[in-house]
Amino acid sequence: MRLKIAQVGEAVLRAQARALSPQEIASIEIQQLIAHMKETMRDAPGVGLAAPQVGLPLQLAVIEDSEENLKPLPPEDLAERERRPVPFHVIINPKITTASDRTVEFFEGCLSLAGFSAVVPRAHSVGVECLDELGQARTIKASGWYARILQHEIDHLNGGLYIDRMRSRTFSSLDNFSRFWKGKPVKEIQAQLENEFSSTSG
């Protein structure tokens, strides 16, 4: 069953999600929710979906970056973003325990801000402790695009959206991103936007 995805402005996206107990994780209700979220994420399509995005303030998210997602993308883009296939998995009650000092900046979108994108700085690598869909403890070490996905989804569980972290001058509709910026390096885009701002504000 495909679930309705909440859009920016809905209060649930700004709520602190609550942790799930092992008993709740094992319940039919949560296992069905995971199955429905998986279907919704794939249908959207997206690479992650957090429970608050489907109206439930729970510390649960599903993640998958499949081979199919990567096929249409130029190899140089995949290399620059360090984007590799990530099999489907569930993170429950996740906590970022380590984050690299090195940050990387790329355009990022969100199913709850349909039709928009912006440059967002994120830690290049993170360590995450969480429970899986069986309630088993799991430690994840991630870098590149996978680390970005994890940080994005964990933000959702804490009431955050990428617009809280974005380089605001890069915020763009996806149509205009494709029209003006697609294929250009992020640093070049940022420099051009800053130069235009300086010339109009001076």
Image (spheres, rainbow, N blue to C red):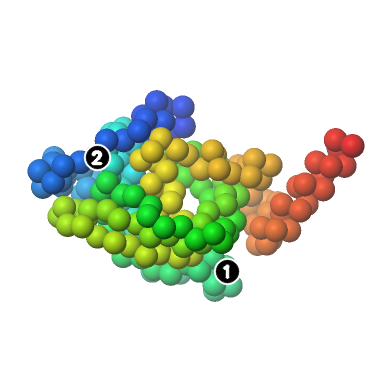
52 relative to 182, above or below? above
Residue type highlighted by circle 2: Ala
User: Residue at 54% of width from left, 39% of height from top?
Assistant: 163
Q: Residues within 10 Å of mark 1 (few under 14, many from 20)?
A: few
Q: Which of 16 and 187 is in front in this view?
A: 16
The residue beneath circle 2 is 19
The residue beneath circle 1 is 80
Real-space Cα separation, disc 2 to disc 1, in angstroms: 35 Å
Quadrant containing the C terminus is: top right
Q: Give how far across and how far down residue 130 sits, in percent.
A: 27, 53
Quadrant containing the N terminus is: top left
Going from the N terminus, do you reach mark 2 or mark 1 first?
Answer: 2
Q: Give how far across and how far down residue 99 sits, in percent.
A: 46, 57
User: Residue at 37% of width from left, 65% of height from top?
Assistant: 141
Q: Give how far across and how far down residue 8 sits, in percent.
A: 46, 32
Residue type highlighted by circle 1: Glu
Quadrant in which residue 69 is drawn: bottom left
- Which residue extends farthest right? 202
- Can residue 46 be seen? no
Q: Which of 197 and 40 is in front in this view?
A: 197
